[in-house]
C-alpha cells in the first residue's frame, strides 16, 4: 500500500522536503503532492494558458482558476492531507485546503505551533490529528503501516 499525501501550506520554507526526507528515512511508502511551489509559475499560469489579461485583478483571477483546478484534482486523489500553519506566513490557502479536506471527508493532520492553538481551534477540532512538528506528523502516518 502507498499513501497519497497532499501537503497544504506555505511554499516559502523547506517543510515539504523535511517530510519527504522523514518518509524516506522511515521507509514509509508515500506519494506526495501539493500546491505549485514555484510562485512565479503559479502567478503566471493563467496568462500562459488563456492569454494576456487587461489588469492585475483579472490576471489573478485567471491564475487562481487554473491553480484551483490543480488543487481540486490533487485533493480528491489524496488519501490524507497534511496542513502546516506556521508563525511567519499568512495561511489563507492552507486554511482553504484544510477546510476542503474536511468537506471531502479526507483525513486531516494539522501541524501548528502551540501559539496558534486559539486561532485554529475550530479547524483543529475537525482534524483527525493535531501535532506541532513535521516529525510528529510522519510518526502518525508511520503508525498506519505497523
Image (cartoon, grey):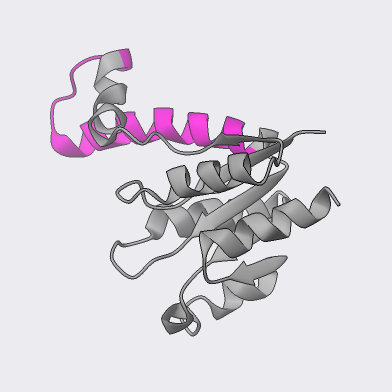
Residue 34, image x, y percentages: 50, 38
Front-most of 40 and 57? Answer: 40
Check the image and name the residue furthest to the left.
55
Res. 109 image quadrant:
bottom right
Q: Is 141 on the left-hand or right-hand side of 47?
A: right
Q: Residue at x 70, y 42 (%)?
A: 28
Q: Position of residue 48 (x, y in %)?
A: 27, 16
Image-based side of 67 in relation to 53, left or right: right
Secondary structure mainly formed by the magenta segment: helix
Answer whether residue 59 is magenta in the image. Answer: yes
Q: Nearer the viewer, residue 31 or 126?
A: 31
Decide which of 68, 106 is in the foreground and name it. 106
Q: Is residue 138 left or right of residue 10?
A: right
Q: Residue at x 30, y 24 (%)?
A: 46
Foreground pick, 56 / 108: 108
Residue 103, image quadrant: bottom right
Question: Which residue lies at the image location 13% right of the left edge and 26% below the top edge?
Answer: 54
Q: Position of residue 121 (x, y in %)?
A: 56, 80
Is any atom of residue 107 visible in this view? no
User: In this view of the protein, can residue 93 be seen by the observer?
Assistant: yes
The stretch in magenta equals 49-75
Q: 97 above or below 4? A: below
Amino acid at each position: 500500500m502507498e499513501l497519497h499525501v497532499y501537503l497544504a501550506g506555505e511554499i516559502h520554507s523547506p517543510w515539504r522536503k523535511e517530510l519527504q526526507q522523514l518518509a524516506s528515512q522511515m521507509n514509509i511508502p508515500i506519494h506526495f503532492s501539493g500546491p505549485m511551489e514555484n510562485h512565479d509559475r503559479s502567478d503566471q499560469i493563467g496568462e500562459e494558458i488563456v492569454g494576456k489579461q487587461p489588469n492585475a485583478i483579472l490576471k489573478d483571477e485567471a491564475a487562481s482558476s487554473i491553480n484551483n483546478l490543480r488543487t481540486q484534482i490533487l485533493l480528491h486523489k489524496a488519501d490524507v492531507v497534511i496542513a502546516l500553519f506556521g508563525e511567519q506566513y499568512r495561511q489563507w490557502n492552507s486554511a482553504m485546503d484544510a477546510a476542503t479536506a474536511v468537506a471531502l471527508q479526507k483525513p486531516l493532520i494539522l501541524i501548528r505551533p502551540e501559539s496558534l492553538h486559539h486561532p485554529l481551534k475550530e479547524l483543529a477540532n475537525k482534524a483527525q490529528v493535531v501535532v506541532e512538528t513535521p516529525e510528529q506528523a510522519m510518526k502518525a502516518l508511520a503508525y498506519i503501516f505497523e
